[in-house]
Image (cartoon, rainbow, N blue to C red):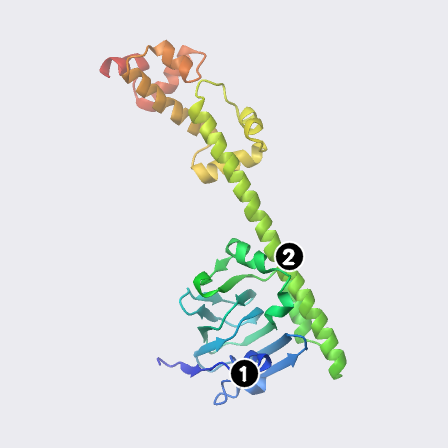
Amino acid sequence: MDGRTAMTVPPQAGYAQWLTAAAPAVDGLGWERHMSVDDLGDGVSIAMLDLVPTEDVVIAVEGPATFSVSIFLDGEGTLAIDGGQPLEVTPGTAVVCATDQTVSGIDTIRGGRRLRMMDVRFQPSVLQDLGGPLWRRYGGALLADCSVPERGAVMVGFPAPAPLLQIALQIISCAYAHRDLRRLYLRGKALELLAVVMGTFLNAGHTALRAERDQSKIDAAQRLMEERLHEPWTIARLARAVGLNEKSLKAGFRAHVGHSIHAYLTKVRMEAATQMLAEGRTVTEVALATGFASLSHFSTAFRKATGLPPSAFARRA
């Protein structure tokens, strides 16, 4: 397979067994020697992997409903749910995957470079009252959303924020050798990691909601200018009318409409003016109807927009 090693990992009975499915398949490559798995009880597990694959590896995996957070500290490759787009992973990528049924996919690991990652998994029962709407509603607000909604599968990748990377490093470097102390420490870190991830989704959601609210206000500003051309609009007056601060209105208008507020207002006024003049209305009537208190100002703006003074345009029309 073009110099790549391919392996298929079937689903296995039991949650802890499925957790180990994607990495040790690799009996022939000896990956199991580079992997550790901690079953922390109550549906929480952590797997850690650190090795340098000698060649590209393609892994077909399949597993039951779960929620996982993977942090790639080193390594590159792609993750894909069957029927979805591949998600590129690079050092510093965090991947959240949530499924509510058995889902299969293909993972590709690029060889010749270190692969160091950790994977924290929570059985759905652990998250019964936490978070679900966050990742399903706001996943697309993050860097890359490769979900397959029709299969009940969410997969979102984003740059891991500093607190998330710090927790991942603390988990990997856990110094507790005593089994009970190690489980207690790692379980606490797993829940802390979950809190940071949920906070990331929540912040992304708030940002998306603000953007939606701003967009509706920008749309309202656009309609006001189009429907009430005769009014002497200023940025300050327009911002007050739609309930948005001037800085956000100016930036959002340019981003969403593609023009500055002044340029757009001039554009719609000139389009309306040409229509009115073509219909036979006088230059004075048109100037007042499009918000110009001065005929000279109107004539200058009209000539700049059309190349003709309004009177000459009216005669041609």
Residue positioned 44% across, 11% down in the render: 294
Q: Secondary structure at mark 2?
A: helix
Q: Is residue 233 left or right of residue 286?
A: right
Give the position of the N terminus as an image quadrant: bottom left
Does any portion of residue 272 appear in the rendered image?
yes
Foreground residue among 218 and 48: 218
From this view, report whether residue 224 is shown above or below residue 143: above
Mark 2 is on which residue type? Gly
Q: Position of residue 6 (x, y in %)?
A: 41, 82
Tell me the number on the disc at residue 13.
Answer: 1
From this view, report whether residue 228 is shown above or below residue 66: above
Tag 2 residue: 199
Between circles 2 and 1, the one closer to the viewer is 1
Foreground residue among 313 and 13: 13
Q: Secondary structure at mark 1?
A: loop
For marks 2 and 1 on the same chain, the one whose residue lies earlier in the sequence:
1
Badge 2 crowding class, 10 Å Cα cut-off, few under 14, some 14 to 19, many 20 or more, is: some
- Residue 291: image quadrant is top left
Residue positioned 45% across, 29% down in the render: 223
Foreground residue among 201 and 234: 201
Q: Position of residue 11 (x, y in %)?
A: 49, 80
Q: Position of residue 258 (x, y in %)?
A: 42, 37
Q: Residue furthest bottom?
A: 28
Does any portion of residue 162 appear in the rendered image?
no
Mark 1 is on which residue type? Ala
Residue positioned 27% across, 17% down in the render: 278
Give the position of the C terminus as an image quadrant: top left
Q: Position of residue 179 (x, y in %)?
A: 73, 83
The reply to whether the C-beta atoms of the residues labelled 2 and 1 are less than 8 Å apart is no
Q: Residue furthest left?
A: 316
